[in-house]
Image: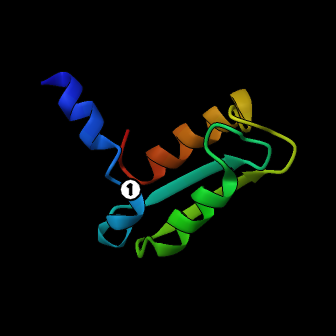
């Protein structure tokens, strides 16, 4: 059954659910990210109706922002009562 579930998950696209997100959203992307291209993240971000913020790193890839972004993310989570 795990194989069937994994195969079926390919049918789901987060864009189909983005307009239902009500919680605060922090998006982070590196323009040079080949794993999750920034264009996809932008499309998702633009559809989400909730309170949102975007951190963009023009010269970074998958690990956009590194340790500094990690600290900023923890601070953002604390401000929004998540941590």
- In this picture, residue 62 sits left or right of residue 73: right
Q: Residue at x 62, y 64 (%)?
A: 42
Quadrant housing the N terminus: top left
Residue at 34% over, 61% down: 23
Residue 58 in picture, x, y percent from top left:
84, 50
Number of residue marks: 1
Q: How is the image coloured?
A: rainbow
Q: Nearer the viewer, residue 62 or 56?
A: 62
Q: Residue furthest right?
A: 59
Q: Quadrant of residue 22?
A: bottom left
Which residue is most to the left? Answer: 1
Q: Residue at x 62, y 33 (%)?
A: 70
Of helix, strand and loop, which one carries label 1?
loop
Drawn side of residue 59 relative to residue 73, left or right: right
29 is higher (above) or lower (below) than 52: above
Q: Report the residue that reaches farthest toward the top.
A: 2
Is 37 or 47 nearer to us in this picture? Answer: 37
Does residue 42 lie above or below 65 as drawn? below
Judge left or right: residue 45 versus residue 35. Answer: left
Identify the image quadrant of the C terminus. top left
Q: Which residue is mark 1?
A: 13
Say if 56 sits above or below 51 in the image: above
Residue 71: name its quadrant.
top right
Residue drawn at the location 63% of the way across and 42% of the way down: 72
Residue 13: x percent and y percent?
Answer: 38, 56
Tell me the crowding category of disc 1: few under 14, some 14 to 19, or many 20 or more residues within 10 angstroms, Cα based: few
Q: Quadrant of residue 53?
A: bottom right
User: x and y percent of residue 57 in the render?
Assistant: 79, 48
Give the x, y percent position of residue 32: 80, 43
| Image: 22 above or below 7 | below
């Amino acid at each position: 059954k795990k194989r069937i579930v994994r195969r079926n998950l390919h049918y789901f696209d987060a864009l189909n659910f983005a307009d239902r997100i009500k919680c605060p959203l922090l998006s982070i992307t590196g323009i040079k990210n080949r794993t999750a291209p920034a264009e996809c993240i932008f499309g998702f971000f633009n559809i989400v109706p909730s309170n949102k913020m975007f951190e963009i790193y023009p010269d970074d890839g998958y690990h956009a922002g590194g340790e500094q972004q990690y600290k900023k993310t923890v601070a953002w989570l604390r401000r929004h009562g998540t941590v």
